[in-house]
Structure formats: structure tokens, C-alpha cells
Amino acid sequence: MLNNLNIVGRLTKDPETKTAKETTITNFVVAVDNTRKTKDGNKKTTFVQCNAFGGLAEAVQKYFKKGELIGVSGELEQDTYTTDKGETRYTYRLIVEHIAFCESKKAEEAPKEDNQPKFDQYTGKPLENK
């Protein structure tokens, strides 16, 4: 079976980073516009909770801010909890495995092509440009 989700959207707020047991964890929410519209013709948006770990967490914190377009792929994970009324509720989050820059900065702000950060797909650590 395959559990892989790919999304492109905008960060709803600045990523939040913390360290737990010597692992960096960054939490962020991506707003993804759907192609389908609601009955009244409005655009529908899905908000996806994302969790990045280690080097990827540090990269998201360093390079992305509220409103910026980001591409994210990873594994969808489900959590279950019970409310005070005894109702079962489900939440979902994307465990980030890859990130992508989806828009360029203004010319004066953007790093030159040779300086564009690249990340190891397995560790999430920045690669040295060669």
C-alpha cells in the first residue's frame, strides 16, 4: 500500500519550531486551494497540518514565512481522540519527507541559482553547493 501526499499551498502563519529529545520539530499549516468550488461558487480551501523533523524542520524554519508558497510531500498520519461527550474525533497531519520552493523571491532578494539551497532527500540536511 502507498501512503504519499503531495500538496502545494501557502503557509497560514510562520512555522513554529521546538526541540524535543534533541530532535528539531517544526509545525506549520499549509492552505491548499481546491479546484472544486462550493455550491455558492466560492473557492474551497483545505488546511493541512504539517510536521517536519530534523534538518527539514530547520530548513522550513529558516527559508519559509507566512504567506509563502511551499511544496510539501510526505506521509499522511491519522490521530484519534475522544471528546468530553464520548465522541470519537479524527485529525490528520502530513509527516514531511520533502519540501520544495515554489516561487522565487524578488530579484534583489533571491539567491543566485548557484546559491539556491538544496536538501538531502533522506536526512533533510542542506547540501553543499558544488
Image (cartoon, grey):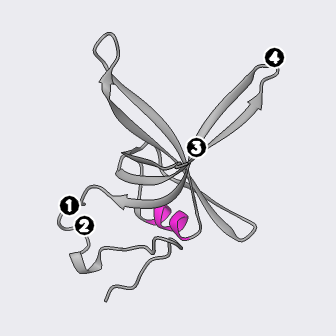
Give the magenta range: 55-62
Q: Amino acid at mark 2?
A: Glu
Residue at image point 24% right, 60% down: 104
Give the alpha-carbon distance from disc 2 to disc 1, as whole Å: 5 Å
Residue at numbered disc 4: 85
Q: Amino acid at mark 3?
A: Arg
Residue at numbered disc 1: 106
Q: Earlier in the sequence, mark 3 or mark 1?
A: 3
Residue at numbered disc 2: 109
Give the alpha-carbon distance from disc 2 to disc 3, as whole Å: 32 Å
> Main structural element of the magenta stretch: helix, strand or loop?
helix
Residue at image point 45% right, 75% down: 120
- Nearest the eye: 9 or 66: 9
- Furthest-front residue in this view: 1
Q: Earlier in the sequence, mark 2 or mark 3?
A: 3
Visible residue check, residue 112: no
Residue 27's place in the image compared with 62, above or below, is: above
